[in-house]
Image (cartoon, grey):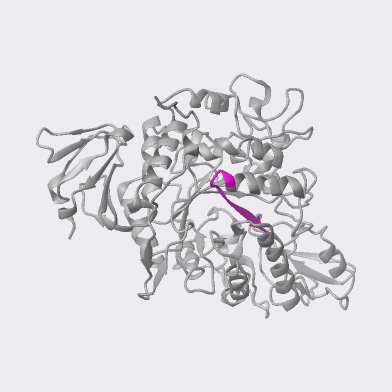
């Protein structure tokens, strides 16, 4: 009798499909791992600590790699690990290469990379290239004078005639002016985010060359991809033209709260410039020299996030993937909303290039999306959403802790106002509470101090909400019906479905409140039905052809005796393989 393998997630997969896909220009491409990848985003600072500091580190990530592998994801994306004052979770870098002492050593990163690859996990590293910290040696030199070797490495401009900022460009974080005055140069420098994050001047060829060298450093180490932070912020209008005011006929921009004063302007000149697309070509050509590596771009703060993100992936001299704001709507989840979102994304991207996000270090948690903070969706809703998100065409990023169903930490109830660490939240509290609510440390153990994140006597960098303990990993791991084990089951099943890892996608007609999606590849045609309502819905299956219900996923739906109809209970899913002859 063969012994049972308790580490079932380490069983290698064989006979994976060698697939091709065809883009909107009828050009055929060989399938790549990233096109339909599930990418687990984690912040080492909030994941697992092994040292004496208040935050996590790379040895802690290494310690938890088998947990990540147990989920069934394809890759991990690490938020910045570079030397940084940590004003903004490491997105204020003072070096583009190397590992900050708080996170460990260069050797720790090499170990993480090697173990991840042995577990079948790709590693994607955050690349912060739109700006640096004001403490970066480049900026310290640039600010000294107007004629030093790095004088034009940042965005500098003379004061306006009245001595004020050169134009009306604003910070995306505060909505106030994005210009700061520098006495030594008697000029202003521009920042899109924090005053301590001066923008790099991407119109400077030397800056672009330095970025390429940083990329080459990490690619030579063997990483599998780079996530480009704020990629649509790289270039600005060199003429420094004012952003035009937003008129009543102009749609509201995406990815930014409507009460941010920045929304009073159209995002045309300070960022989202066409020049960025040209500047990406050398970077793409460099990455293409390293087989099976990719570029993932963040394109969320803009007029039309989906269209702009798609533009960043069209052609062989841009990005491989870009994520967007299509699902970041603070409105109730409905079948009509999902259908419009899928139609919109498919029309913009064509076949390939899209990446979906819901939870994120910037955009809150899955459990708090779609009005989840104001209304109480039942637990079954989040089990259903796990399936729906994993059958969408394209890649998907899963933020750490969303597989546990963690709610955002409440401010000031669970994170007191004097313990807010997010500079965005510090600047705008109490009108805006910031992003700390989704950045709290990962709860590993329900009973131990600091929930197993940090040694007993230490104080974590952010408080851990007591209600997160009820959803800790140890508690959910032991419960076969937990949300964690639902994600595991779906992700492991997904890996074996050619229609999901290589397939086409078609929206089907369905009753009101039901989203019907067909995913297909060669012989497999996978029917995916989701009841996005609080009432029972009956669906006549004869419109789709003969189907074989996939029972083992355990969703609550009832087939009629004739197998022609299925009763979907509220917030439930029905997944079935269609018979080959049902295909057109």
Which residue extends farthest front? 1
Confirm whether the magenta stretch covers residue 123: yes
Q: Quadrant of residue 199?
A: bottom right
Q: Is residue 121 visible?
A: yes
Q: Where in the figure is residue 86, as x and y percent of width and height? A: 75, 47
Q: Position of residue 167 (x, y in %)?
A: 69, 72
Residue 362 on image: x %, y %: 59, 49
Residue 326, compared with residue 548, is above or below; it is below
The image quarter containing residue 154 is bottom right
In the foreground, 72 or 366: 72
Does 363 sit left or right of 87 as displayed?
left
Q: Nearer the viewer, residue 303 or 5?
A: 5
The question of residue 53 being in magenta is answered with: no
Query: Could you tell me which residue is drawn at 38 percent across and 74 percent down?
Result: 27
Please give the name of the residue rendered at 79% of the width and 32% of the height, measured from the top-left corner: 52
Q: Position of residue 397 (x, y in %)?
A: 50, 49
Residue depicted at 36% across the width and 49% down the height: 391
Q: Say whether residue 361 is visible.
A: no
Q: Quadrant of the N terminus?
A: top left
Of all residues, the one furthest to the left in this rendering is 562
Q: Over which residues does the magenta segment extend?
A: 118-129
Q: How many marks?
A: 0
Residue at point 80%, 45% (across, down): 101
Left or right: where does residue 146 sit relative to residue 391?
Answer: right
Quadrant the C terminus occupies: bottom left
Q: Residue furthest top?
A: 447
Residue 191, by quadrant, is bottom right
């Amino acid at each position: 009798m063969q012994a049972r393998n308790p580490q079932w997630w380490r069983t290698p997969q064989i006979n994976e499909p060698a697939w091709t896909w065809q883009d909107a220009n009828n050009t055929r491409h060989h399938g790549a791992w990233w096109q339909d990848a599930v990418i687990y985003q984690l912040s080492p600072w909030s994941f697992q600590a092994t040292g004496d500091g208040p935050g996590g580190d790379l040895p802690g990530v290494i310690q938890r790699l088998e947990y990540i592998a147990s989920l069934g994801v394809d890759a991990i994306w690490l938020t910045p690990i570079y030397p940084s004052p940590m004003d903004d979770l490491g997105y204020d870098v003072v070096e583009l290469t190397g590992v900050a002492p708080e996170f460990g050593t260069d050797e720790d990163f090499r170990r993480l990379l090697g173990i991840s690859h042995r577990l079948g996990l790709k590693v994607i590293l955050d690349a912060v290239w739109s700006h640096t910290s004001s403490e970066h040696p480049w900026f310290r030199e640039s600010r000294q004078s107007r004629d030093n070797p790095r004088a034009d490495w940042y965005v500098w401009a003379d004061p306006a005639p009245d001595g004020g900022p050169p134009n009306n460009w604003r910070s995306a974080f505060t909505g106030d002016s994005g210009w700061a005055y520098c006495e030594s140069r008697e000029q202003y420098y521009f920042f899109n985010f924090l005053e301590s994050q001066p923008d790099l001047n991407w119109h400077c060829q030397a800056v672009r060359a330095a970025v390429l060298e940083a990329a080459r450093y990490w690619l030579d180490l063997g990483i599998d991809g780079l996530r480009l932070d704020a990629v649509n912020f790289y270039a600005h209008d060199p003429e420094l033209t004012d952003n035009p005011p937003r008129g009543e006929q102009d749609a509201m921009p995406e990815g930014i709260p409507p009460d941010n004063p920045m929304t009073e302007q159209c995002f045309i000149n300070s960022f989202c410039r066409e020049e960025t697309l040209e500047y990406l070509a050398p970077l793409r050509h460099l990455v293409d020299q390293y087989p099976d590596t990719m570029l993932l771009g963040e394109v969320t703060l803009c007029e039309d996030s989906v269209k702009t993100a798609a533009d960043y992936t069209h052609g062989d001299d841009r990005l491989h993937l870009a994520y967007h704001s299509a699902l970041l709507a603070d409105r109730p989840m409905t079948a009509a909303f999902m259908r419009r979102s899928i139609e919109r994304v498919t029309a913009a991207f064509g076949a390939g290039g899209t990446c979906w996000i819901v939870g994120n270090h910037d955009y809150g948690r899955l459990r708090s999306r779609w009005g989840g903070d104001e209304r109480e969706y039942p637990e079954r809703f989040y089990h259903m959403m796990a399936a729906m998100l994993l059958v969408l065409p394209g890649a998907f990023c899963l933020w750490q802790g969303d597989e546990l169903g963690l709610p955002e930490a409440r401010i000031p109830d669970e994170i007191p106002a004097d313990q807010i660490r997010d500079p965005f939240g510090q600047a705008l509290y109490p009108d805006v509470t910031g992003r700390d609510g989704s950045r709290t440390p990962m709860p590993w153990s329900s009973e131990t101090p600091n929930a197993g994140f940090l040694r007993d006597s230490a104080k974590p960098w952010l408080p851990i909400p007591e209600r997160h303990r009820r959803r800790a990993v140890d508690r959910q791991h032991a419960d076969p019906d937990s949300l964690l084990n639902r994600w595991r089951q779906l992700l492991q099943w997904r890996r074996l479905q050619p229609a999901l890892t290589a397939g086409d996608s078609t929206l089907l007609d369905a009753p009101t409140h039901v989203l019907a999606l067909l995913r297909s590849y060669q012989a497999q045609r996978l029917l995916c039905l989701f009841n996005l309502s609080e009432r029972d819905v009956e669906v006549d299956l004869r419109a789709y052809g003969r189907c074989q219900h996939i029972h083992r996923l355990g969703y609550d739906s009832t087939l009629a005796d004739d197998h022609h109809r299925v009763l979907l209970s509220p917030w439930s899913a029905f997944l079935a393989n269609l018979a080959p002859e049902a295909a057109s």
